[in-house]
Image (cartoon, rainbow, N blue to C red):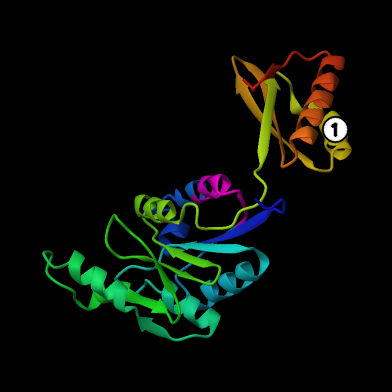
Amino acid sequence: MSERIYTAGLVVIGDEILSGRTHDKNIAQVASWLQVQNIRLAEVRVVPDVIERIVEAVNALREAYDYLFTTGGIGPTHDDITVDAVAEALGVAVVVHPTARAILEKYYSDKGGLNEGRLRMARVPEGAELIPNRMSGAPGIKIGNLHLMAGVPHITAGMLDALTGTLEGGAPLLSETVGGFIPESEVAILLRDTEKAFENCQIGSYPFFREGKVGSNFVIRSTDEAALKACMAQLCEGLDAAGFAFTHGGI
């Protein structure tokens, strides 16, 4: 396993996401899956069903990160334009993948056959490989560091499962949590100074309101286990010195 940190970007495609008609669930599940693969989701962009906007986002994120994932826009209708946009971004043609066509022919053999709309789901940027889809037949698409997946969350989950263990990942991100009925504004300087003392650690502060009281959970993340433990020890010492009760694991 490499010690370097691998990163990924995600482009969420669809007017229905931006309009609020559909509530996105893919960001969370892609991020969680990537963590297990020891890859960090570093940026997400949500773009409409406009080729120019998709091309712009794809080109920016595929250059910035080790991997790029897209969700949405690979279905059978006229506004499913992700394949066309990615092909344009890469400067390649759109072709019908023979294996994808065969998969769809088999899947739809007892569902009315393969019509023009369904055949659209066999289109790929030239040179692409397929990501298996055990849910609805139509495969996802892999080309270079790009992974084109469905917008329907349970189908996306199946495609992610098919990719499990196939991507090179880096150092795993470790985390520890401490929390209590501690107003974050009263320990802001402590948090800043503690994080500054450990350059390999990041401290996230997550306030809450419970039982009529204000509190916070503090999550320390690092790829260095020794640094993580030392950072946690220093933070707890600081909280204790400030007179705050705290609970390991958070509350």
Relative placement, left or right, of 90 versus 183 is left
Query: Around disc 1, counting alpha carbons within 10 Å, would you say few (fewer than 14), some (14 to 19), or many (20 or more)?
Result: many
Task: Report the residue marked by disc 1.
Answer: 194
**How many numbered dots are placed on residues in this image?**
1
Q: Position of residue 89 (x, y in %)?
A: 54, 79
Q: Position of residue 101 (x, y in %)?
A: 27, 75
Image quadrant where one finds the C terminus: top right
Q: Position of residue 168 (x, y in %)?
A: 59, 57
Q: Nearer the viewer, residue 23 or 19?
A: 23
Asked if residue 21 is among those painted magenta in the image, a careful observer would answer no
Q: Position of residue 60 (x, y in %)?
A: 63, 71
Asked if residue 35 is among those painted magenta in the image, a careful observer would answer yes
Mark 1 belongs to which amino acid?
A: Thr
Q: Secondary structure at mark 1?
A: helix
The magenta region covers 30-43
Q: Is residue 3 visible?
A: yes
Q: Nearer the viewer, residue 90 or 189?
A: 90
Residue 144 image-quadrant placement? bottom right
Residue plotted at (72% across, 42% down): 223
Relative placement, left or right, of 215 versus 96 is right
Is 118 placed above or below 33 here?
below
Q: Is residue 120 visible?
A: no
